[in-house]
Amino acid sequence: MAADLERLDAREVLAWAYRELGRVAIVASFQAESIVLTDPAAEVVERPEVITLDTGRLPEATHRLMNEVRRRWPVRLTVVSPHHGDVEAMVAEHGPNLFRDSVDLRHLCCDMRKTRPLDRALAGYPGWITGLRRQQSHERAAVPVAGPDPARPGVLKLAPLAAWSREQVWRHIEDRRLPVHELYGAGYTSIGCEPCTRATADGEDERAGRWWWEQGAVKECGLHWTAASLVQGARA
Ligand code: SF4
């Protein structure tokens, strides 16, 4: 099945997912890929489910784009927040900007604000859809269009844009006149939490602006750990 899905285009993969899995959600960060997926999803099904993680540290522009998406497409948007007790305890122990102090504390913050909320949000879903692309970083170079989620046994993780280049994404955005996150206009090539993302320079990897102060650490927040990362205990 996974090999067959590799041969389908993104819209066909979405159609397969809605038909075969029944309940499936796009997990959106409101980067360009989220928009490129939401657009055909709203043509394939009446009210596509979109889940997003409001970490409490997002740029205001992300909320503006969320609103625009709600106005443009008939999505069922679920905005998931971290458990307040988890965040309060973490900040009491380590301070609000713990992610600057060590990679382990950065992983802890991502775990509290992103991974655990996503675990809660995806309970009961047989599969989810992400905008991962192989070209985004060397850690993502082998992302399959469909495969088991290493972090969630029995759940299928779909990346319909896995083989897309950055140029394809932007050509599609322009052709379809889709809305995009304002920070792309300020030189960002990947957008996450406000304190952990900066613009990139020409020639840098797309994800070089994420946790830019870290040396040699994997530029992932825990939502997309590979099986190898999990084995190495990268996810607390
Ligand atoms: Fe925390 Fe930064 Fe991860 Fe956001 S990206 S959850 S602020 S460490």
Image (cartoon, rainbow, N blue to C red):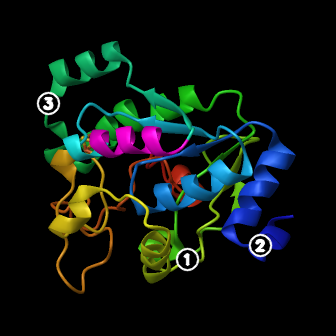
**Which SS type dominates the magenta stretch?**
helix
Residue 229 is situated, as x and y percent measured from the top left of the image, at 50, 56
- Ligand 1 quarter of the rendering: top left
Residue for point 56% across, 52% down: 38
Please give the residue where the numbered disc 2 appears in the rendered image: 8
Q: Are marks 3 and 2 in contact (CB under 8 Å)?
A: no
Q: Are marks 1 and 3 in contact (CB under 8 Å)?
A: no
Q: CA distance from mark 1 to mark 2?
A: 12 Å
**On the rendered image, what quadrant is the C terminus found in?**
top left
Residue 133 is situated, as x and y percent measured from the top left of the image, at 52, 69
Please give the residue where the numbered disc 3 appears in the rendered image: 96
Question: Range of the magenta residues?
Answer: 63-73
Q: Is residue 149 visible?
A: no
Residue 54 sits inside the magenta stretch? no
Please give the residue where the numbered disc 1 appears in the rendered image: 164
Sequence-wise, which precedes: disc 1 or disc 2? 2
Residue 131 is situated, as x and y percent measured from the top left of the image, at 53, 59
